[in-house]
Image (cartoon, grey):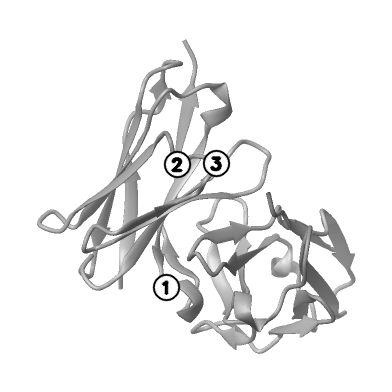
């Protein structure tokens, strides 16, 4: 079965760039859309954006100017970069296979906490 | 900016039935938004329960059902069990292929 694992620095300084990787195992990244979703402590979930294995992307308009999602099919990985971070970007970041209207988000990774602090 | 609205919290008695809703700050939710519902239990990865309004994901018990009620999407849990105590989120799919997530409903079973 497909499993996802997020990885990256747990602490990022304000104004710097947050970088995370999601490794897909048990299946191929090809043929699907993949989303990043985040959850600030004690708050609800926010969709960040998705990428198709072909490289086509769609971002949340509120984050679009700072977000880049990329894919490396040879490594079965997708990546997230969020620039100019502030404390408001502190959150658990999840990656998930995005089946859209045909299945929702399934499966999800376990998530990784990223704290923005000096 | 359009906001997806959900009840912040809800409680249900064991064995009871509860309906959670998902609306829009402006406009109505219809099947054209292909509403999806997922469950988040503390310490666990979220899992999708319902997609495309009323289709259950694999392995989801038929106690969970989705529908459109009036101008909102709805998730109904029948015969509530203790391990249904979780946060429930809805997702709407827009015509521009964006995903709108609701703020979530914290369900207590007591």
Residue A11 shows up from this direction:
yes
Res. B110 visible in picture: no
Q: Are marks 3 and 2 in contact (CB under 8 Å)?
A: yes
Q: Looking at the image, tell me whether mark 2 or mark 1 is earlier in sequence order.
A: 2
Q: Quadrant of residue A34?
A: bottom left
Residue matched to label 2? A64
For the residues marked 1 and 3, what is the alpha-carbon distance in whole angstroms? 22 Å
Q: Mark 3 lies on which chain?
A: A
Labels 2 and 1 share a subunit: yes
Q: How crowded is mark 2: few (under 14 residues within 10 Å), some or many (20 or more)?
A: few
> Where does the image place residue A79, in percent across and percent down from the top left?
28, 45
In-front residue for pair A93/B12: A93
Q: Position of residue B65 (x, y in %)?
A: 70, 85
Q: Is mark 1 on a helix, strand or loop?
A: loop
Q: Mark 1 points at which residue?
A: A99
Is residue B84 placed above or below A115 in the rendered structure? below
Marked residue chain, label 2: A
Q: Nearer the viewer, residue A77 or B61?
A: A77
Which residue matches tag 3? Answer: A62
Q: How many labels does the image show?
A: 3
Query: What is the C-alpha distance between the residues marked 2 and 1?
Result: 21 Å
Labels 1 and 3 within one chain = yes
What x and y, as percent, mark residue A114?
A: 45, 31
């Amino acid at each position: 079965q497909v499993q996802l694992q997020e990885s990256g620095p747990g602490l990022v300084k304000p104004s710097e760039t947050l970088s995370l990787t999601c490794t897909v195992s048990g299946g191929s990244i090809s043929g699907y859309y993949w989303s990043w979703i985040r959850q600030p402590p004690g708050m609800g979930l926010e969709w960040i954006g998705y990428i198709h294995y072909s490289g086509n992307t769609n971002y949340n308009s509120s984050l679009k100017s700072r977000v880049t999602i990329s894919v490396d099919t040879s490594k079965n990985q997708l990546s997230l970069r969020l620039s100019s971070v502030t404390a408001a970007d502190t959150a658990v970041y999840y990656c998930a296979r995005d089946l859209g209207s045909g299945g929702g988000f399934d499966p999800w990774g376990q998530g990784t906490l990223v704290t923005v602090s000096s | 900016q359009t906001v997806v609205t959900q009840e912040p919290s809800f409680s249900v008695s064991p064995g009871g039935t509860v309906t959670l809703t998902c609306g829009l700050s402006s406009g109505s939710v219809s099947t054209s938004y292909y509403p999806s519902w997922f469950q988040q239990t503390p310490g666990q990865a979220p899992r999708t329960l319902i997609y495309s309004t009323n289709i259950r994901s694999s392995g989801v018990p038929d106690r969970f059902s989705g529908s459109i009620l009036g101008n909102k999407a709805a998730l109904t849990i029948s015969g509530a069990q203790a391990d249904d105590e979780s946060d429930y989120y809805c997702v709407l799919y827009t015509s521009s292929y964006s995903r709108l997530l609701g703020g979530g409903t914290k369900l207590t079973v007591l």
